[in-house]
Amino acid sequence: MFIEPNISGERRGWIEVICGSMFSGKTEELIRRLKRARIANLKVEIFKPAIDIRYNEMNVVSHDSNYIQSTPIDNSQTILLLANDVDIVGIDEAQFFDDEILHVCEVLALRGTRVIIAGLDMDYLGRPFGRMPGLLAIADFITKLHAICVVCGNLANISYRKSAAEAQVVIGEMDIYEPRCRKCYNDAQVAN
């Protein structure tokens, strides 16, 4: 990734989005980038939606049990209140945040903050999820990760829901979801 040198000395911010299906390593990559920033003595704040309590109420935790301390919040505007004078803001599970998350990220980047966001780009039906399409549109850098299809072993990009629940948001793990490639996902949809 090339970053243009800043001759003026003014701190420049930008927005990075890490997206993909469940089990693709999004949170793992978010944690890796944030831990590297801390090693460089940068001031980092991490946020996650309060509804995500799968592994821990306070920490952002990957499926591989890697974790980093975070602040759970109910409203994206809270990030602006809690992220003053920081170098980097990390946001996990961005698809669950409200409409204001785009504005919050833009304000942070204009303040000179590096914003790193992770989230599902598609829901269990393969449709754009929440505010992620908007975040992808305003991102300066995008990393799309893939899982491995549990049926055929090819690259997976859709989180197939094994349960009959129809709500868009159903928090769960391998008991409810599994990564599928486009073909295996569609084969399952036709069979149901």
Image: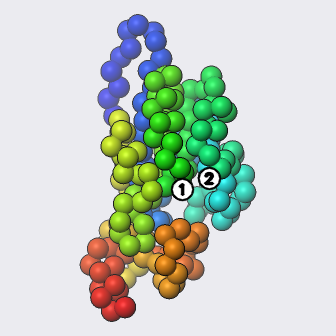
Q: Which residue is mark 1?
A: 96
Q: Is 177 located above or below residue 133 in the figure?
A: below
Residue ID at (67%, 54%): 50
Does the residue at mark 1 contact the one at mark 2 (Cβ under 8 Å)?
Answer: yes
Using the numbered discs, state the Cα–Cα distance from disc 1 to disc 2 in whole angstroms. Answer: 7 Å
Identify residue type, mark 1: Phe
**Viewer-closest of 84 and 29:** 84
* Numbered disc 1: secondary structure: helix
Query: Which residue is outermost to the left?
Result: 183
* Residue 16 appears anywhere in the view: yes
Identify residue type, mark 2: Pro
Number of the label disc, if any, that sits on residue 145: none
Categorize mark 1 by other alpha carbons within 10 Å: few (<14), some (14-19), many (20+): many
Q: Position of residue 161 (x, y in %)?
A: 47, 78
Work out which quarter of the rendered image holds the N terminus and state it.
top left
Q: Position of residue 46 (x, y in %)?
A: 62, 41
Work out which quarter of the rendered image holds the C terminus and state it.
bottom left
Residue ID at (57%, 63%): 63
First in residue order: circle 1 vs circle 2: 2
Left or right: residue 124 compared with residue 186: right
Q: Position of residue 138 (x, y in %)?
A: 36, 38
Residue ID at (71%, 59%): 56
Left or right: residue 67 compared with residue 150: right
Residue ID at (38%, 73%): 125
Number of the label disc, if any, that sits on residue 49: 2
Left or right: residue 128 compared with residue 58: left
Categorize mark 2 by other alpha carbons within 10 Å: few (<14), some (14-19), many (20+): many
Q: Is 110 located above or below residue 102 in the figure?
A: above
Q: Is 34 located above or below residue 132 in the figure?
A: above
* Residue 36 appears anywhere in the view: no
Q: Position of residue 137 (x, y in %)?
A: 33, 43
* Numbered disc 2: secondary structure: strand
